[in-house]
């Protein structure tokens, strides 16, 4: 059995049906984007499959995992499990699923906040998570989906812009790295 199929079977047992369905959507969307941008399809699929592997762990378990793996987290991440799961997911992908490819682990690590100067796999995973077929809450989703497949940087910029606007409208706290990432890609327009 291929490693991806073993991981998939394990995730199906350990994630809620909703999270597992989202995971499959991200995996297949990442594969499509990888084909579009000449990225390694297997790496994109693995990153997509594992991006939320720690999402449903308790905050306590995520913190223990990160501490055991000596992964630094910011105070903002510590207080926001929606962000904490990305770094915890990279740690879990390494520890539980034996993923050692740093590009895959880094893509998982930055799939929620993004980061300035991302490589193609990072961009693919960020956008696949944002545009996968089960998503429908963003009124600009169709435009972002179109851009994701025609100009990955523009797709990334639009996704970041609308994410920031959404968080501002909700008066939610925003991780500084997401703001820096938006400014970085905005300056390259």
Image (cartoon, rainbow, N blue to C red):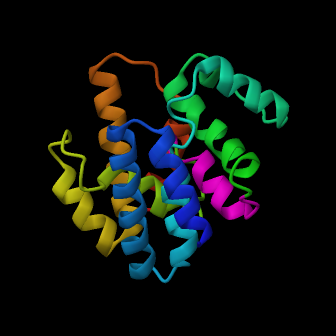
Quarter of the rendering containing residue 145: bottom left
Query: Quarter holding the C terminus?
Result: bottom left
**Is 154 or 65 nearer to us in this picture?**
65
Q: Residue at x 45, y 75 (%)?
A: 34
Region of the chain picked out in magenta, as a range: 99-113
Q: Can residue 188 be seen in this view?
A: no
Left or right placement of residue 84 versus residue 49 in this view: right
- Picture layout, residue 49 above or below residue 30: above
Residue 1: x, y in percent?
59, 72
Residue at 79% over, 36% down: 71
Left-right relation of 28 to 56: left
Residue 7 magenta-highlighted? no
Residue 116 point in image, percent of width and height: 58, 51
- Position of residue 178 measured from the top left corner of the image (x, y, whole percent): 51, 38
The answer to whether residue 105 is magenta is yes
Count of numbered marks: 0
Q: Is 126 drawn above or below residue 36 in the view shown? A: above
Which residue is at the front of the view, 69 or 95? 95
Q: Residue at x 30, y 74 (%)?
A: 150
Task: Residue 24 in the image: state x and y as whole percent.
Answer: 38, 56
What's the residue at 17%, 57% (across, down)?
142
Residue 99 visible at all: yes
């Amino acid at each position: 059995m291929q490693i991806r199929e073993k991981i998939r079977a394990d995730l199906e047992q350990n994630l809620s049906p909703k999270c597992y369905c989202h995971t499959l959507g991200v995996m297949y969307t990442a594969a499509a984007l990888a084909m579009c941008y000449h990225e390694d399809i297997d790496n994109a699929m693995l990153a997509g499959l594992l991006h939320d592997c720690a999402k449903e762990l308790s905050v306590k378990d995520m913190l223990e995992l990160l501490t055991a793996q000596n992964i630094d987290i910011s105070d903002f991440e510590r207080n926001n499990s929606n962000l904490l799961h990305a770094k915890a997911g990279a740690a879990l992908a390494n520890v539980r699923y034996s993923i050692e490819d740093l590009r895959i682990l880094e893509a998982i690590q930055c799939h929620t906040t993004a980061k300035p100067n991302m490589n193609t796999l990072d961009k693919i995973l960020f956008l696949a998570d944002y545009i996968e077929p089960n998503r429908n809450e963003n009124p600009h989703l169709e435009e972002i989906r179109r851009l994701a497949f025609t100009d990955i940087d523009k797709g990334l910029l639009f996704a970041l812009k609308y994410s920031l606007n959404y968080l501002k409208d909700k008066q939610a706290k925003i991780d500084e790295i997401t703001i820096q990432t938006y400014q970085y890609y905005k300056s390259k327009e």
